[in-house]
Image: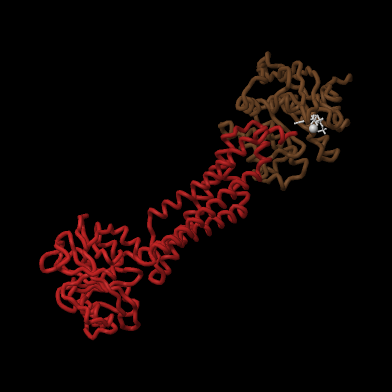
Chain colours: A brown, B red
Amino acid sequence: MSKQHDVILEMKNVTRTFTQAGQKINALKKTDFTIKAGEMVAVIGPSGSGKTTFLTIAGGLQNPTHGTVIIRGKNITKLSQKQLSATRLNEVGFILQASNLVPFLTVEKQLKLLDKVYRRPTDTKGMTTLFKTLQIEKNRTKYPSDLSGGERQRAAIAKVLYGNSNLILADEPTASLDTTRAFEVISLLAKETHERKKATIIVTHDERLLKYCDAVYEMHDGELKKRKK
Amino acid sequence: MFLALNELIKEKSRFALITAVIILVSYLVFFLLALAYGLATSYTKAVDTWDADSIVLNQNANGTIGRSIITQKNTSLLNADGSATDTAAPLGVGTATIEKDGSEDIALFGIDPTSFLAPTPIEGRSIQNEHEIIVSNELSSIGIKLNDTITLQGDDTSYIVVGITDNASFQAAPVLYMSLKDWRTAASATSGMIGMRDDTSINAIVLKEGRAVDAPLEAQSIKDFIYTLPGYQAQVLTFSLMIGFLIGIAAFVLAIFIYILTLQKKEIFGVLKAEGVPNHYIASSVIIQVAILSIGGLIIGMGLALLTGTLLAGKVPFAVNPVFFAGISFLFLACAALGALASVRSVTKIDPVEAIG
Ligand SMILES: Nc1ncnc2c1ncn2[C@@H]1O[C@H](COP(=O)(O)OP(=O)(O)OP(=O)(O)O)[C@@H](O)[C@H]1O
Ligand SMILES: [Mg+2]
C-alpha cells in the first residue's frame, strides 16, 4: 500500500439531516473523522443516536447533506450511483448484524461470487488460509442456514477479507453472539485488521469489546466524540 | 450465471414446482391448440389439397355449396362436354352413409377424374372406369380397404375401391371420390330424389386462377368459401377465443410467478447491492433464471403434447401447425421476458441503504 493512502477514510464537515413530516432530524451533526490503515475503532452510543447513518455515509451507501467523504484519496461525495457501487465493491466491506451471506450459496461460493463479480480467478490458497485462520475450514461447503451464529459471522468476515476492501464497516457484528463467541470474532477481526492493514469501524453496544479497539468514539444525538483512554 | 445456477441447485424443489406449472400450462395450451387446429383442418383438408384460387357457385345458393346448382347452359368455364379444363374443374358434393364393419357418414365428391381435383392415391390407382371410387384412409377404421366392394345406404349400385387417399376430409367427414356421372346417380339416390337427376348438373366449379364470372354464377375465394362453411366460423372463433384467453392467462401467471420470485429475494439483492455488486450482474442472473425455467418448461410441455398426440393418433383430430406452435412459444417467452423485465426494474429500484439500516 502506498504511503499517501495511509489514511483510508477521511470525513470532513459531514452532516446528514432527514426531513420527515416537515420536521428536520439532524441524524448526524458536523463530523470530522479519520481512520488509517491497520486501525480498528469502535463507535458506541444509544439507539437512534446516528451510528448506522454515520456508517452508511462512510461506506458510500448514502450521500451526506453537507461535507466530503474521501476514501483512499478519492472524494466520493460527487459520484454517480454506478461509480458509488463500484467504489463499494472495490474499497468497502460490510459485516452486518443479520448476516449478509447469500442464503443459497455455500460458504466457499460466497467468496467465489466476489471472484465472479471482479472477473478474477479464484485464489484457492488464499481462501483456504482464510478459512483456517477463521476456523471455518470444515464449513466450506455448508449453506448459511446450517451454520451457527458465530460461524456465520466468521464466514462474513472471511468474505470481507477475501474481497479487496480496505475499509471494513461492521454494524453490531456480535449482536447475535454470546460473550465468548463475540470476543473470538472481534479479536479475530482486530488481528486481521492489523496484519492486513485494513481500516475497520465497528458499531457496538457492548462495552466489553472495546478493549480490542485502537480508539473508541461515542455517538450522542448525532455528535461523534473521541473517548479519552 | 453463477448466482442463477447456484440458486437453482439449492432451491431444487421450489424451482421444480414452478417448472412443473409452466410445463403443465404449456402442455395444455399446445395440446388444445393442436386439437383445435386438427378439428378446423378436418373441415377443410380436402379443399386445401386442391391448391385452388376460387370456387364458383350459383348466386342463389348464398354461398352454400350444397344448395348451388350449375348446369351446362349456365357456363362456358368448362369444356363443351362438361369436362375440366386445365384451370377449371367441375365438382359435385353430397353426403351419404357408407357401410362395412360399421357405418360412417361421408362426404361424396363427384369429380372429373382427369381434373386437378382428382386425389393422388397413396395406395392403388386413380379412377378410370364406371363405379370406381377412391376413399379417404380414415375409412380404414370401419374396415374399408383397397379392392373392397361397397354400397351406400339408399343406393343399390356397388362400387369398387380402386384407390386410398390421405388428407381427405370435408366438414369433418371422410371424403369418397367418384366420377361425376356416378355421383349424379348416387347423390340423387341417397337423398331419395331420383327425379332431380340432370345429366349436366354440378354444384360448383373450382378455379385454379382467379377469373371474372357472369351471372347467375358468382366466384368466391377459397378462403371465404371455407369460412362460410356451416359451423366452421363458429367453431374456429370459439376455439380461438378459448385458446387465446388460455394463453393470455397462462403467460400472465408465468410473468407474475417470475416477478414474485424476484421480490422474495429483494433483501438478498439489497445486501449484494450494498456490497457493490452492480445492477447488471443481478439483473442478468434474474434473466438467466427466467430463460432456463420458461424455455425448459415450454420445450417439455410441447414434447408432452406431441407425445400425447402421437399416442392418440386417429382417435382425435390432432394436427400440428408449426407456425402456430412457434407463435405461441414466442408469445409465452415474451410474457416471461416481461415478467423478468419488471423484476429487473424492481432490482434496480432497491435502495441498498435499507439492506444495511
Ligand atoms: N431514512 C431515514 N429517514 C428519516 N429518518 C431517519 C432515516 N434514517 C435514520 N433516521 C433517523 O436518524 C436517526 C439516527 O438513526 P440511526 O439509524 O443512524 O441510529 P443508530 O444509532 O444506528 O440506532 P440503533 O442503535 O438503534 O441502530 C434516528 O432518529 C432515525 O430515526
Ligand atoms: Mg443502527
Q: Nearer the viewer, residue A201 or A186?
A: A201
Q: Is residue A45 above or below residue B246?
A: above
Outermost residue, left side? B80
Q: Nearer the viewer, residue B301 or A133?
A: B301
Name which quarter of the figure residue A175 lies in: top right
Rendered location of residue A105, percent (x, y):
64, 43
Rendered location of residue A172, percent (x, y):
80, 34
Rendered location of residue B126, percent (x, y):
18, 71
The answer to whether any part of residue B259 appears in the image is yes
- Of the 4 image quadrants, the one containing the C terminus of chain B is top right
- Of the 4 image quadrants, the one containing the N terminus of chain B is top right
Query: Left of B225 or right of it: where is B112?
Result: left
Residue at 34% x, 65% y is B229
Name which quarter of the figure residue A144 lies in: top right
Residue at 64% x, 31% y is B276
Rendered location of residue B56, percent (x, y):
23, 62
Q: Is residue A161 above or below residue B19?
A: above
Q: Is residue B44 above or below residue A132?
A: below
Q: Nearer the viewer, residue B95 or B126?
A: B95
Query: Left of B176 or right of it: where is A106?
Result: right
The answer to whether any part of residue B51 appears in the image is no
Q: Is residue B110 above or below residue A59?
A: below
Outermost residue, top side? A4
Task: Say how many tags the image has.
Answer: 0
Q: Quadrant of ligand 1?
A: top right
Outermost residue, bottom side? B156
